[in-house]
Image (tube, helix red, strand yellow):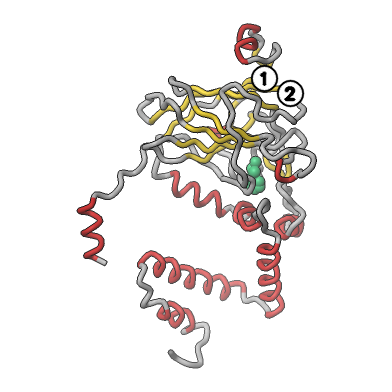
Amino acid sequence: MSTDLGPETLTAAVIDSFKNTPDDRLKEILESLTRNLHTFVREVSPSIEEWEAAIDFLTATGQKCDDVRQEFILLSDVLGVSMMVETINDAETPDATDSTVLGPFHMVESPARALGDNVSPESEGDICVVRGKIVSVSGEPIPGAQIDVWQANTKGFYDVQQPGIQSIGNGRGLLHADENGEFHFRSVVPAYYPIPTDGPVGSLLNATARHPYRPAHIHFIVTAPGFKELTTHIFVGGSEYIDSDAVFAVKESLVKPFTVNSDPAAATGFGVGSPFVEGVIDIVLHPEAQPLSTTTEKTKEIVR
Ligand code: BEZ
Ligand code: FE
């Protein structure tokens, strides 16, 4: 280990300290982290007080986390890191439905619901039917695909944010597509809402004169054996903040019109009054990457 390290030599010394890391990927990540973090610090040239403020901010971010609050995901979201990771990984499956951020509120298991159930039985607002079809990239339906949905109520709160006001599970549902890959559920038309601003991330938005709003949306995680899991949203076409989502997560392909359906037969079929609002999203899943063959695994072991 050298002594008297300074801006010119410190980065190389820290990178060198990782040279015996057995895991190649971990080594690569730590080397890059060191290089980029040191470049950032040299560029910003923080005072000791600014460095302490940064440590305090990260400490407060961690302290704000609990079983129902994930301030670090929120920080990643508002800095565009979550969407950067999504976009990089999405590029591997260009034929599938676009993914978007998970967000911090997928914290509880969604209650099992039958097709057609109301996933927001405690929420007041305009009733809507959300429906669609789950298919493979070649257009084949995927019967039995699992669809996990969650949304805020019309006042902009998730169940976990309102203990004593909403029961856990309101605004959530775990459904399975039918034999044609089709699904539908009832809910209330979601509203735009602010991300939580009562923590360090809120202070950051405030200090930078940024608004905290997300356009109206419903979250989806779609899974099926043999297919890559998809985390996405359906955005309500025409919602405010479509063009300025606080977490940069809108993709044009996921914005769908929520239109009025005046067909009384359709209303009867879905068990809602006529007319009703309807949002439609068809979801395309990409096949899962093939697991490495035993031979390939063995070759990798030898190379290691
Ligand atoms: C959400 O849509 O639930 C969400 C996403 C990112 C940050 C905050 C909330
Ligand atoms: Fe959300």
* Residue pointed to by mark 2: 126
Helix, strand or loop at mark 2: loop
In screen coordinates, is 235 left or right of 210? left
Q: Mark 2, residues whose alpha carbon is within 10 Å: few (<14), some, or many (≥20)?
A: few
Q: Nearer the viewer, residue 270 or 59?
A: 270
Tell me where residue 92 appears, x and y as whole percent: 39, 44
Q: Which labelled disc corresponds to residue 197?
A: none
Tell me where residue 119 appears, x and y as whole percent: 65, 29
* Mark 1 vs 2: CB contact within 8 A: yes
User: The residue under label 1 is which amino acid type?
Assistant: Val
Tell me where residue 166 appears, x and y as whole percent: 75, 38
Q: Nearer the viewer, residue 71 or 29?
A: 71
Circle nearer the N terminus (1, 2) = 2
Helix, strand or loop at mark 1: strand
Examine the image and state in which quarter residue 226 appears.
Answer: top left
Residue visible at 44% across and 83% down in the picture: 13
In screen coordinates, is 155 left or right of 95? right
* Residue pointed to by mark 1: 277
Q: Nearer the viewer, residue 183 or 93?
A: 183
